Image (spheres, rainbow, N blue to C red):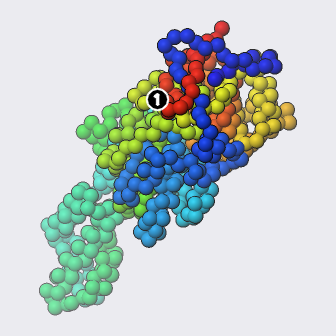
Amino acid sequence: QMFIRDSSAAETAPLPAGAGAGARPAVVPAGGLLEREIERPRSGPMRDIVATIQPEQDEIVRAELSVSLCVQGAPGTGKTAVGLHRAAYLLFAHRERLARAGVLVVGPNRAFLGYIAAVLPALGEFTVRHSTLADLVDDVTVGGADTVEAATLKGDARMATVLRRALHDGLRPPTGPVAVVTRAGRWTVGEEEFTGLFADAAAGLAAGTFRYAIGRERLAGRLANAVRVRAEAGGNFPTDGAVRTLARSRAVQGAVEAVWPKADAAALVRRLLTDPQLLARAAADGMLDADEQRLLLAAAPPGGARTARWSPADVFWIDEARDLIDGTGGFGHLIVDEAQDLSPMQCRALARRCADGSLTVLGDLAQGTTPWAATSWSAQLAHLGRPDAHLEVLTRGYRVPAEILGFAGRLLTHIAAELTAPTSARTAPGALTLLPTSDVAAAVTAEVARARTRSGSFAVVAADADVAALAVALRTADLAVDELRADSTPSRACLVPASLAKGLEFDQVIAVEPAAIVAGEPHPRLGLRRLYVVLTRAVSELTVIHAEPLPAALHSPVPAAIDPSPGRIAVDVPIITET
């Protein structure tokens, strides 16, 4: 049952049930191991939740190593648990192979990684690497920022083609012969033969047979071998070692440099963003229009290639360029959480790190909160290099009580109408409280004081811009809690910016000013998705404190949120009515 509480009242009163077709049944579940384990109070980082793994989840965990999976999971369906237990299972079943190739878990930020860090060690696995996307390219210093428009464009999959064209733009066919002088004599490779060697190497590069740097080495080796043929015709027979030395000689390297120059990833990206002519050539044939080219040139980071203040989106341009030049090492299996938020260029960065392995993709399209968030898994999986990955859909939730899931579910028709509304396997009467107030800070401090008297974890979640003021109010009331940052780990009592709430869970959540959370995003739909994330972080209780009217989307008819399992008792989850 949902409650609405007047901040001046001492008692909690039930919100009158709304009449009409919008109301949906809820159920009161019986007790059991699952309920007891989920409802056991939390004290900080995510714990091993093997006791809560359900049959439909276990099937995903035990899928073959060769199978790439995508798990579309509604809040509380256990997709993160599935991913972590899949890592442990695969390491157990394929220990020798994965010991060599490795397993990588990628999360959205360090706070999330800190939250899940203890799970695999608790299962006996200590070799899995945990990383954010940015940490995969941690030698590129981020010091700048793009506009939303520029960041979205830089994350577009077309940028991979633009970068490849820019790199290949530096190739120049030979314009003369190559003369090589050694102690044994002087030999000349004619322009026509050199051009043929160059054309063969360029064709292999264009076909993707090898990377740019390997192509350069091959050309040098072929050129040195051409000199060897001439030497042998004259009665000199250089050893293989001498030919390798010749390939590294000043004469051969100089000839190669003129037609196939060395490339540096950061320098290439910097030049592409500052050279209109190069960008125009790389963006030809309708790849980018004039407005898009101007937007990229305007988003060039200040400084040189070594001192540039790169933006987060630039990092993945550099990573793409490095792969084009030198290639990228990979893992035997990669697990990526919150994958719906990745740009196509970020997806490509992950795809090349499991090119010879398999992939487990975890996410929820309804929780996509970046401007470039995926709208379909088919497109996202194509960017991840796994268009044939098997899609699993989890809609039966265990963590979020039906009362809370039903309330948050009112947003689904506005943020992801194509998704099946999730159901909940458990209820918690009184789990949801709406608290309208004229003094948000006072209401928050009162709720924090109340939460401190209970066991388990709690979090105050607010719009990013409101966190600092709430921190001051709580300190003033001698109720200071830990302020969660992108590089910290959640504790038992946290003040959480809405942008960092994704993937976390707390026994009690105090959600502050939903309208401000929505307004904190660049687009209303993204704001509603952010709010959906915030409203689905609670395991036992959700209190929504607001001075502004609740977003209109929360007045929508509630989708079915209750698991209609046999033997459960139906109760009403009403429509909000406010006066």
Query: What residue is shown with label 1?
Result: 421
Count of numbered badges drawn on the protein: 1
Up/down of 357 relative to 489, above or below: below
Drawn side of residue 207 relative to residue 549, left or right = left
Q: Residue at x 75, y 31 (%)?
A: 470
Of all residues, the one furthest to the front in this rendering is 567
Please tell me whether residue 558 is drawn above or below residue 500 in the rendered image: above
Q: Quadrant location of residue 11?
A: top right
Q: Nearer the viewer, residue 146 or 381?
A: 381
Q: Is residue 225 visible?
A: yes
Residue 489: x and y in percent read 67, 49
Q: Residue at x 22, y 78 (%)?
A: 225
Where is residue 54 drawn, in percent x and y? 50, 46
Is 474 located above or below residue 356 in the figure? Answer: above
Residue 340 locus on image (x, y percent)? 45, 40
The foreground one among 441 and 81 is 81
Is residue 304 visible in the rendered image? The answer is no
Q: Quadrant of residue 548?
A: top right
Residue closer to the observer: 313 or 193 = 313
Identify the element where label 1 is drawn.
loop
Which amino acid, by three-letter code, is at mark 1? Ala
| Quadrant occupied by the N terminus | top right
Name the side, left or right, on which 480 lies relative to 135.
right
Q: Residue at x 52, y 28 (%)?
A: 561
The quadrant the C terminus occupies is: top right
- Residue 4 appears at what percent x and percent y? 69, 19
Identify the residue at horizontal 32%, vertical 66% (top origin): 214
Q: Crowding at label 1, few (<14), some or many (≥20) Cα neighbours within 10 Å?
A: many
